[in-house]
Image (cartoon, helix red, strand yellow):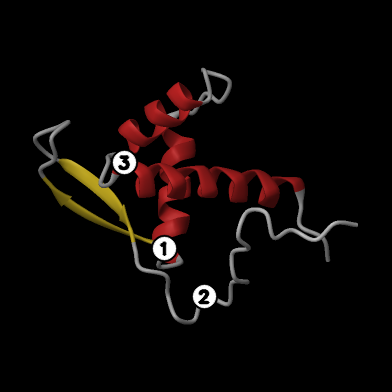
Amino acid sequence: MPPSKLDLLQGTLDLMVLQTLTAMGSLHGYGIARRIEQVSGNQVLLNQGTIYASLVRLEQRGWIKSEWGNLRQQPQGKSSTPSPRPADANLPPTPAIGNASRA
């Protein structure tokens, strides 16, 4: 069964969130959303409900860890960090750039 358009959009957002956390380290959801907007030149505009749904999906899958505490942006809040890749993730290996086969 092919993925639905919603699955594709959620997966794309999840990848953007993971990339942002990998590049920036621990951030609050608001900071993640603003960074994605900044990097996209405001082509991708995210509301808080959208970004928090992505964070919940990623945390449930074990791809990020979230904890309450202090960060440099806010005195209190829940921050997220990428988790080490789970051993049972069943993900294909990431191909190196330039090793893509030509059709």
Q: Which residue is mark 1?
A: 63
Task: State the CA–CA distance, disc 2 to disc 1.
Answer: 9 Å
Q: Secondary structure at mark 2?
A: loop
Local crowd size for mark 2, using a 10 Å CA cut-off: few (<14), some (14–19), many (≥20): few
Report the residue that reaches farthest toward the bottom.
Answer: 88
Q: Which residue is mark 2?
A: 89
**Nearest to the observer: residue 75 or residue 38:** 38
Of the residues under marks 3 and 1, which one precedes in the sequence? Answer: 3
* Residue type for callout 1: Trp
Give coordinates of residue 65: x percent, y percent. 30, 60
Disc number for residue 24: 3
Q: Which quarter of the image is occupied by the N terminus?
A: bottom right
Taking the spot 35% from the left edge, 68% from the top edge, the residue there is 84
Taking the spot 47% from the left edge, 48% from the top edge, the residue there is 54
* Quadrant in which residue 34 is drawn: top left
Question: Looking at the image, is mark 3 or mark 1 nearer the viewer?
Answer: 3
Local crowd size for mark 1, using a 10 Å CA cut-off: few (<14), some (14–19), many (≥20): some
Give coordinates of residue 103: x percent, y percent. 91, 57
Report the residue that reaches farthest toward the right.
Answer: 103
Task: State the CA–CA distance, disc 3 to disc 2.
Answer: 23 Å
